[in-house]
Image (spheres, rainbow, N blue to C red):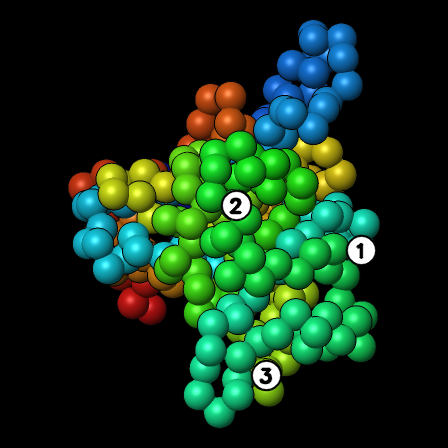
Amino acid sequence: MAAINSGDNQSNRIIPQKTIRKAVISLLKWKKKQISDQESPISGDIDDHIYLLLTLKKIPQKDFTKTPKKITLPHSLITSPETSRSCLIIDDRPKPNSQKLTFDFTDKKIKSLGIPITKILKLSKLKADYRSFESKVELFNSFDVFLADQRVINMLPEILGKVFYKKKKKIPVPVDLRRDGDWKEEIEMGFCCSLLWLSNGTCSVVKVGKFDGMKVEEIVDNVVAAVDGVVEVVPKKWVGVKSFHLKFFDSLALPIYQIDQKDEDMVTDQVKD
């Protein structure tokens, strides 16, 4: 298990930043060598994300696995929200008190707030125009990031299907689009977060960094924030966590935190302090 040290937050007490930094540097060196050996630059088809791999002690109950959890990161995984291709899915179902979101209302609001959204897609149009597998693949490939009204998040796995959800790539980020809400803050936070979708087993992953366009310290900051965010939403918090690893999709997983039975009481005491 990683040594416990003092720090400003709980994850710094459990996982020293130097442990995280060492793992990040090792992974970046590995990826750089891999790309160099291929003698070709990194392409959009290559997954260059660094993942935080979570292993729980027990399989979570179904209540924890129904919807993704937003994990806020200090450094966005999107190089530039202003130039990225983004799709916002809105809930245009009829609602009481004329709270239905129309395309015109949404378009005017995001333009007035200067929010960088490439396409607004109504739920009704999504259901009508993207039924075939081929159309879903086309939609998937057309945008870098998807955001969606949190009121329809539970419906999207069935509508978008395995193209989006099998490999947990480009899963729409839930945002609060109430008419009187702070859309600018919500969508900006949506661009600066990652999603944790707890699996039906003990292992789950969340994106925390990228090889291309991110500095070591930015990735370290994201890992620290992600550990804090993950621990807040998993069953029993730190007590339920068995290990954290960092990895690229195609690399070995480097441990930054592991616990065995003899360490468990020590961690429990630290968490209670």
Quadrant where the image shows the N terminus: top left
Q: Residue at x 54, y 48 (%)?
A: 129
CA gap, disc 2 to disc 3?
26 Å
Picture disc at residue 179: 3
Where on the picture, by quarter, is residue 177? bottom right
Say whether marks 2 and 1 touch (CB < 8 Å).
Answer: no
- Which of these two is toward me, 111 or 129? 129
Quadrant into which the C terminus falls: bottom left
Q: CA distance from mark 3 to mark 1?
A: 23 Å
- Secondary structure at badge 1 equals loop
Q: Which picture quadrant has residue 116?
A: bottom right
How packed is label 3: few (under 14 Cα within 10 Å), some, or many (20 or more)? Answer: few
* Local crowd size for mark 2, using a 10 Å CA cut-off: few (<14), some (14–19), many (≥20): some
Above-or-below relation of 225 to 29: below
Amino acid under disc 1: Glu
Residue 130: give its label: 2
At mark 2, the secondary structure is loop
Residue 29 in the image, given as x and y percentages of width and height: 66, 23
Residue type for callout 3: Arg
Residue 199: image x %, image y %? Answer: 31, 43
Which tag, 2 or 1, sits closer to the chain's start?
A: 1
Badge 3 element? loop
In the image, is residue 89 above or below residue 253? below
Q: Nearer the viewer, residue 133 or 20?
A: 133
Considering only order in the chain, which callout, 3 or 2, is on the residue closer to the N terminus? Answer: 2
The residue tagged 1 is 82
Q: Residue at x 75, y 75 (%)?
A: 108
* Residue situated furthest front in the rendering: 128
Q: Left or right: where does residue 49 sit relative to residue 168?
A: right
Q: Which kind of residue does numbered mark 2 sit on? A: Tyr
